Amino acid sequence: MLGWTKIGAGLVTGFYAGDVAAVKAAVDAGAEAASQVGEVASTQVIPRPHEDLSKLVEM
């Protein structure tokens, strides 16, 4: 996990890096844990994001 950001209205975005399968497993585990205490709105794994994307995200 690289970090996370509160995006408002109780929503949080988490940032992960690594092997796609490992990241998917981490996101699935996190979503399962989060669903035990609240509502999971959405999950998304981007396998090969554009390298400039990291410039848009503060971590």
Image (cartoon, rainbow, N blue to C red):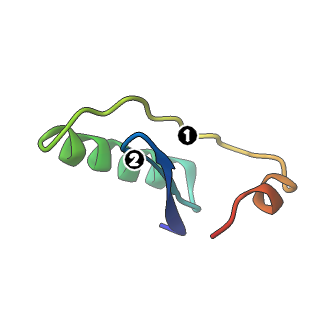
Which residue is pictured at 28% across the width and 48% down the height? 29
Position of residue 8 in the picture relative to residue 48 (left or right): left
> What residue would you read off at disc 2?
27
Position of residue 2 in the picture relative to residue 11 (left or right): right
Q: For residue 57, which quarter of the picture?
A: bottom right
- Taking depth in this image into account, of 37 and 32 the one nearest to the observer is 37
Position of residue 26 in the picture relative to residue 4 (left or right): left
What is the three-letter code of the residue carrying label 1? Val
Quadrant where the C terminus is found in the figure:
bottom right
- The secondary structure type at the circle numbered 2 is helix
Q: For residue 22, which quarter of the picture?
A: bottom left
Q: Are marks 1 and 2 in contact (CB under 8 Å)?
A: yes
Could you tell which of marks 1 and 2 lies nearer the N-terminus?
Answer: 2
- The secondary structure type at the circle numbered 1 is loop
Q: Residues within 10 Å of mark 2 (few under 14, many from 20)?
A: some
Q: For residue 39, which quarter of the picture?
A: top left
Which residue is pictured at 37% across the width and 29% down the height? 41
What is the three-letter code of the residue carrying label 2? Val
Q: Residues within 10 Å of mark 1 (few under 14, many from 20)?
A: some
Q: Position of residue 26 (x, y in %)?
A: 37, 53
Q: Residue 36, which numbered label?
A: none
- Taking depth in this image into account, of 24 and 42 the one nearest to the observer is 42
The Cα–Cα distance between marks 1 and 2, rounded to whole angstroms, is 8 Å
Q: How many marks?
A: 2
Q: Position of residue 52 (x, y in %)?
A: 87, 55
Which residue is pictured at 12% across the width and 41% down the height? 36
- Taking depth in this image into account, of 35 and 21 the one nearest to the observer is 35
**Residue lying furthest left:** 36
> What residue would you read off at disc 1?
45
Which residue is pictured at 73% across the width and 45% down the height? 48
